[in-house]
Image: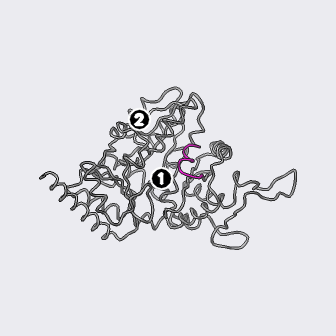
Amino acid sequence: MTDRLETKFIHSAGVDSKTGAVNVPIYLSSTFHQQSIDEFGPYDYSRSGNPTRQALEDTIAKLENGTRGFAFASGMAAISSAFMLLESGDHVLVSEDVYGGTYRFITEVLGKFGIEHSFVNMTDLDEVAKAFRPNTKVIYIETPSNPVMNITDIEIAAKLAKANGCLTFVDNTFMTPLYQNPLDLGADLVLHSATKFLSGHSDIVAGLAVTKDAALGDRLGFIQNSFGSVLGAQDSYLLIQGIKTLGARLKQSSESAQKIAEFLHRHPVVEEVYYPGFSFHPGNPIQERQASGYGAVLSLRLPDKNTARIFKDALRIPVFAVSLGAVETILSYPATMSHAAMPEDERKKRGITDGLFRFSVGLEHIDDLLEDLEQALEKVRVKSKLSIAN
């Protein structure tokens, strides 16, 4: 019998073989004694490897059905290291509405190393197919995309990539291994901002990567060791603990997110709700096919910045902050938070308006969240009418 994911989340790290401890020991050591000048043990220096981090890396590799996992000091460290697999003269295709930090790295850093890029609408596979160049080496996908929740067909995109001799990288932060396994759909490398749902408690910053085959794993392992932006033992332990509860946390948050999306869709003040669980969402058929859930993140658009300010000030439960995927509900304003690095004209092209909020649903009681949203939107409605009247 094959253990299901919820079981794997709890038991993948195993028990300590020496003591039987049910939690992975935290090895707070930068260096390790060696018995011989001729042969070293499995660990010598914690940048190159640490037993606690290794347990985490083995865990995420199992959960994503890959050959090798890697833990980094942040999600951007994982993404940046993956892009360092490229060489000068290479070209990369990137999801048009990618996370702002990824946009910044691609537009302001990669070019310094002679690496070219093109942003494409990954929901239009004809556009993707036409965008390949002879020097294209990687297709980089975010699905659902941040923050307007566009859906890319991973399997077809990966086939296009392979036909053009390219690797496929997928940011799986929003879905996690619970709902989506990009490597099973043909991707070569999967990435996570583990700060988010995998950790789930807003207490660490971390990034993870998993490779499909051993050869690519060796290459990324060399980059990880050379750059040295690795996750420390303490944070590795905390992330393992967070992963253990992922199944329960994300399921409850996702159930609440669906109810909230439906409520917001019906509300007259809200102009649009971006949520892949809607049957009328353009990407819903693809999401149904390649994922087993819709996740706990949605976005909503209000008319303008003034109504956005009223809405934010009226809410009492959500934390107004950067990030997502935590036990507390987090309201974010992409224009000045996650996508602040993106020029205004580029944001607007991607639907990131001054009235757009991203809403990451936490574990609060659903009725409390709905009541809070209702009273906040009522204040928006009343104050907007008064403004028009005056």
Verify whether residue 304 appears in magenta.
no
**Judging from the image, what secondary structure is the residue with disc 2 in?**
strand
Q: Residue 344: x and y, percent? A: 36, 39
Number of numbered discs overlaid on the protein picture: 2
20 or 327: nearer the eye?
327
Q: Residue at x 49, y 48 (%)?
A: 171
Q: Which residue is mark 2?
A: 120
Q: Which residues are magenta?
A: 72-81
Q: Give me the disc on residue 173.
A: 1
Left or right for 199, reference 330: right
Residue 77 on the magenta segment: yes
Q: Nearer the viewer, residue 78 or 389?
A: 389
Disc 2/disc 1 C-alpha distance (Å): 20 Å
**Residue 9 versus residue 347 in the image, above or below:** below
Residue type at tag 2: Val
Question: Where is 313 relative to 118, above or below?
Answer: below
Q: Are marks 2 and 1 in contact (CB under 8 Å)?
A: no
Q: What's the magenta bit mostly, secondary-structure-wise?
A: helix
Give x and y (percent) for residue 364. 38, 69
